[in-house]
Amino acid sequence: MTTFPLLAVLLPFAAAFAGLLLSRWPHRRPADTRAAWLAILPTTVSALLATWLAWGPGFAFLTGTTTTSPPTGQTYGTIVTGGIPISLTLQADDLSSILGVLVTVVALAVQVYSVGYLKDDPRYPSYSAFISLFTSAMLLVVYAGDLLVLYVGWEIMGLCSYLLIGHWWEDRGNSRAAVKAFLVTRLGDVGFLFGIFVLGMAAGSFRITDVLTKVPEMSTATLVTATMLLLAGVAGKSAQVPLHTWLPDAMAGPTPISALIHAATMVAAGIFIVARLFPAFLEAQPTLDVLAVMAALGMLGAALAALAQDDLKRVLAYSTVSQLAYMAGGLAAGSDTSAIFHLLTHGAFKALLFLGAGAVIHHAGSNLMTQMGGLRRELPITFVAMTIGFAALMGIPPASGFFSKDGILLAMDDALSTGVLTDAAGLLLYGCALATVAVTGAYATRAWLRTFFGEARAVALPEPEPGTAHVVDVTEAPRTMLVPVILLAIPALLLGFAGEPHLDLGLAATSVVLAVLGAGVVYAFWRIDPIADPARLLGPLRGPCERAFYVDGLYAALFVRPVLALARLVVRTDDVVVDGAVRGSGRSARGLSGVLRLAQNGNVQLYVSGVLAGVLLIAVGAVVFT
């Protein structure tokens, strides 16, 4: 079992290598079929290995108990750097083992789903290979026993996100979204890398176990500096305020990639890092307060933005920002167990919702809810599965989100009395969390009603020729797309029972009442006019919410446009000054050579005239100066 973490990481990596180099050779079988098998089989084995590793310690983590057995794994060598060595260690403890299951199961579902979703796509082999590389990179982050080894996987994920979001790069909007995701996350990664350096230098080692052992000996200033820097990377990867703007635009990529990024890889990495280094964060009180404020603003602001979106995928994208802020709030409140539990349940129901949305979009031919409606009759299986997903998102019992979200709210409630946070930060966090419960119920109900209820908003087709029957496609998605949706509905509904329930009946009842209240208000507005958008209940706030409070516009004004203006100035300076000097020297040399050429034109009379002129000058000079 000590080699299981290594095998779990290497199998998807080998699948990516084989998919890029071998899927189109030899040409005896279709490339897509070969690429699908090269991607699905290694991911399946990796999922089995991860499940085996999690069978003991992982499920102990969910129940809130600790195991006495040491982490499973081993060291495969040491890189000598001239300073602190880098230990090539992979390990599976209670936290990493259960996250490994989430990553591999969702990745496997996405790989199977993509076979039908991207059928006949000319770049499917490279697409499936990049998903395998993405999976391997996230598993490296999860199982790494050294912070710099973890950072390698962290950066490879950033590259894979760029490649997959921009899969349909011919559309300029897709390529711009990929570049935006890459640049914004890289901005946070600069701080993240320096945070690793601060912790490693203070501990004298980059091994995670050594760093956590040395935390009690570190000064408060060191811990606050390191954790604040790490928080920059967390904000970038997990799309938290103020580096959250890339995630909604990342919906330009294929829908299965949205499910992978939002449920199990990129966005999960930031929350995982805080949980992995949680003892260091607990000793840095100012960092927890900053994390609490970030979470409070992110959860409520993103939920309000989701309530005003018309694009179904962008609704789910802002929902992810909001739910990740819940997890960050749970960590700030001092409960890593509740945050990770919600990360697991969220991975299940958000993957379900994205893949279900993909089936809806595949059927409707549009992302916009204004062109949907009445789809419960045409897509009954997808309707039932997404209903479970929306119930889990809202926190309606017995869906999984009810148990995990209640655990986070309970942790926030306890933080007000335990002093984990300052009073102002604790009250802000708890108040925004309760308000977000109601807004979550509102935007989830709005998306559910506008997609599956009301009158179908079908586009009129041209009248067929006489004698030809109308053919209407009212079937579900292909089986490769439908089976993962059905299977993900099971953990979305039942995963909440896997952990040890820590329910406070009063708080649980309050959260359910708030969710139902938000849903009821939306239903009332929808019932009055099923064609109109219930988002009109926002009144004058609808515009700011739809534009996500103009944060993108603010960043464009403060950073993007000045940087572009500076870039244009540099280009102009390079063209006029630097290149102009080079071109001017060339022109001067050519002009001078033209003058010198006059003396070498082969005209004898000119030569004799020149000699006589020279003699005359010499003679005049001799007379004048003697």
Image (tube, helix red, strand yellow):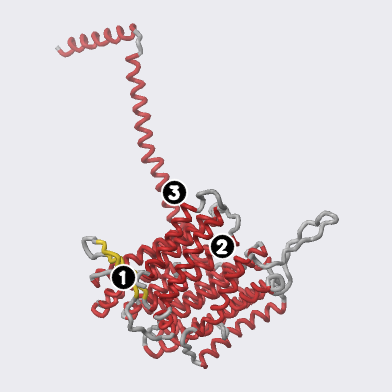
Q: Which residue is mark 2?
A: 114
- Name the secondary structure under disc 2: helix
Q: Amino acid at mark 2?
A: Ser
Q: Is residue 596 above or below residue 481?
A: above
Q: Is disc 3 surrounded by few (<14), some (14 to 19) or many (20+) residues within 10 Å? A: few
Spot occupied by residue 452 in the image (x, y as percentages of width and height): 68, 73
Which numbered disc covers residue 74? 1
Which mark sits nearer the N-terminus, 2 or 1?
1
Quarter of the image with the N terminus is: bottom left
Q: In percent of the image, x 71 and y 70: which residue is there? A: 378
Spot occupied by residue 520 in the image (x, y as percentages of width and height): 64, 83
Quarter assignment of residue 512: bottom right
Asked whether the beta carbons under mark 3 and mark 1 sit within 8 Å of each other, the answer is no
Q: Amino acid at mark 3?
A: Arg
Q: Which residue is mark 3?
A: 568
Q: Is residue 505 above or below residue 232?
A: below
Spot occupied by residue 299 in the image (x, y as percentages of width and height): 49, 76
Q: Nearer the viewer, residue 582 or 505?
A: 505
> Could you give the CA–CA distance between mark 3 and mark 1, rounded to whole angstroms?
52 Å
